[in-house]
Image (spheres, grey):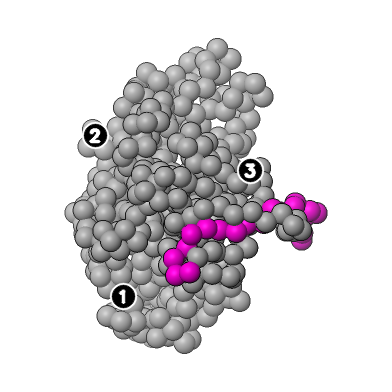
């Protein structure tokens, strides 16, 4: 082991500095000053790793990244090798370094003794890959040998792109179909720029096109081409559409004007920042400027909404969540960032009714009480009688999570099997649906989840597709030889 490791005993944990609150409230730029997290800082923070025999950071990473290995290489100044190790298991380390909830995953499970704080993993991961882009170490996925088989991928989000890159590197002819006009899925239209600047995603699109991956954008399956046609056109199909159907809230006044789903609001903001014409934003319907905003929900999407509203110039921003802070499903770092930026959190409160004649003017909420855990281990919530109160509101945003769309209907393929939750049903060993040659992964199988899990599913699906196509080709050769 290099002498420069195990430095947690003398070096304190350090994350990249944040921009001044007033400055970051005024724009959609990333809030961390990554440029100041230079080689020296990255090397020092990486040297704090204890190189433990059973690295819990890797165990609790969905991609099982070889984190201690690339931390050690970074500490030794061997950044190109660190990038090679990092990218061997992660298709988008520069994205995961920015948006993964490290406080719940790798860093949250670091085994350094209490009082010394965990190793800074996410910022080092981002630094390694951003340096790789600057130095030209990141190459398009060009195979050594072209294969005669093609794979169709539905969805240009993280799962679809991860599968596309891995299959292309093996020589497959890869075609990606997406109903939007840009590659990236929710990484482009759902996640705000202050967490993930769009050029970080768009440069991957350019790189993949250089590598020979074909993108068919503004192409909706079921409208422009059917799933049956794709199955005829390709040797295998991978469905990685994600989940986009917003969960609703059933209470009085939910149909009033000024009450919008989170993704609709975030997409309008992101499109506006990308320079697209957005009539609903320009009319003010999806712009929080000058408004009193209430966001209902406690996940990462809710945090994206409240922090976007702050940047749009809202008069006030309130997050209404029915449980307490300790039970929030979102990243605690994002909650802290929101608090710093002036968001007011109203814990243990749930909407009872939306007030107003035609346009929302307020949210009547009721205080909630945390009770005993249910079968899942999560505490149940119950309303406190006589505790209703009203929050003035001009724009209410529902950030209650996402459900899958009805894909059998949308794809005009009734035989496509789904679970009772509406997600696609697959054999979890092979990742294939009951339709031969049709695979699925990411949120459309596991439900709304993290980008890192989508990447894992895409990479695993690529392996299963490769095995399936080659086995099928082998069977054809054997039959022809008989």
Asked if residue 331 shows in the view, the reply is yes
Res 128 visible: no
Provide the residue designation for mark 2.
134
Q: Regarding mark 2 in the picture, which secondary structure is present there?
A: helix
Q: Residue at x 37, y 37 (%)?
A: 25
What stretch of residues is rendered in magenta? 357-375
Q: Residue at x 47, y 78 (%)?
A: 406
Q: Which residue is mark 3?
A: 325
- Cα gap from disc 3 to disc 2, whole angstroms: 39 Å
| Badge 2 or badge 1: first in the primary sequence | 2
Badge 2 density bin: few <14, some 14–19, many ≥20, Cα 10 Å: few
Reply above or below: 153 against 71. below
At horizontal 59% and vertical 69% (from top left) the residue drawn is 251
In front: label 2 or label 1: 1
Residue farthest along the top direction in this orientation: 10
Q: Nearer the viewer, residue 128 or 242?
A: 242
Determine whether the residue tagged by mark 3 lies in a helix, strand or loop.
helix
Residue drawn at x 61%, y 76% as measured from the top left: 420
- Which residue corresponds to mark 1? 220
Q: Which of the 4 image quadrants contains residue 322?
A: bottom right
Q: CA distance from mark 2 to mark 1?
A: 35 Å
As drawn, 467 above or below 194: below
Is 110 on the left-hand or right-hand side of 305? Answer: right
Q: Which mark is residue 300?
A: none
């Amino acid at each position: 082991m290099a002498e420069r490791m195990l430095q947690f005993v003398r070096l304190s944990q350090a994350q990249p500095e944040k921009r001044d609150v007033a400055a970051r409230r005024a724009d959609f730029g990333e809030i961390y000053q990554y440029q100041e997290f230079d080689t020296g800082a990255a090397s020092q923070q990486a040297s704090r790793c204890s190189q433990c025999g059973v690295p819990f950071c890797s165990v609790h990473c969905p991609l099982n990244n070889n984190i201690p290995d690339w931390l050690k290489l970074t500490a030794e100044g061997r950044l190109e090798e660190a990038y090679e190790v990092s990218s061997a298991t992660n298709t988008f380390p520069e994205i995961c370094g920015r948006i993964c909830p490290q406080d719940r995953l790798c860093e949250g499970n670091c085994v350094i003794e209490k009082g010394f704080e965990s190793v800074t993993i996410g910022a080092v991961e981002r630094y390694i890959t951003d340096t790789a882009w600057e130095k030209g170490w990141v190459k398009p996925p060009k195979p050594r040998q072209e294969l005669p088989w093609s794979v169709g991928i539905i969805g240009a989000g993280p799962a679809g792109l991860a599968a596309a890159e891995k299959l292309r590197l093996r020589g497959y002819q890869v075609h990606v179909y997406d109903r939007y006009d840009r590659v990236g899925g929710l990484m482009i239209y759902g996640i705000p720029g202050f967490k993930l600047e769009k050029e970080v995603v768009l440069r991957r699109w350019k790189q993949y096109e250089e590598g020979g991956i074909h993108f068919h954008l503004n192409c909706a399956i079921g409208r422009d081409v059917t799933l049956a046609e794709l199955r005829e056109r390709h040797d295998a199909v991978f469905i990685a559409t994600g989940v986009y159907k917003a969960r609703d809230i059933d209470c009085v006044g939910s149909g009033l004007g000024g009450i919008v789903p989170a993704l609709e609001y975030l997409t309008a903001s992101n499109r506006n920042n990308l320079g697209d014409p957005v009539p609903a934003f320009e009319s003010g319907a999806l712009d929080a400027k000058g408004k009193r905003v209430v966001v209902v929900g406690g996940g990462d999407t809710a945090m994206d909404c409240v922090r976007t509203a702050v940047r749009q110039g809202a008069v006030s921003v309130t997050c209404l969540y029915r449980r307490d802070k300790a039970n929030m499903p979102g990243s605690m770092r994002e909650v802290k960032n929101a608090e710093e930026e002036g968001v007011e959190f109203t814990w243990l409160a749930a909407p009872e009714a939306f007030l107003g004649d035609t346009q929302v003017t307020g949210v009547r909420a009721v205080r909630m009480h945390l009770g005993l855990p249910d079968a899942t281990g999560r505490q149940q919530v119950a309303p406190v009688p006589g505790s209703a109160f009203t929050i003035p509101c001009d724009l209410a945003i529902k950030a209650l999570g996402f459900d899958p769309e009805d894909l059998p209907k949308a794809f005009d393929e009734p035989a496509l099997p789904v679970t009772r939750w509406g997600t696609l049903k697959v054999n979890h060993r092979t990742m294939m649906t009951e339709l031969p040659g049709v695979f699925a992964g990411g949120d459309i199988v596991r439900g709304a989840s993290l980008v890192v899990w989508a990447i894992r599913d895409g990479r695993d699906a690529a392996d299963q597709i490769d095995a399936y196509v080659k086995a099928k080709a082998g069977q054809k050769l054997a039959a022809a030889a008989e």
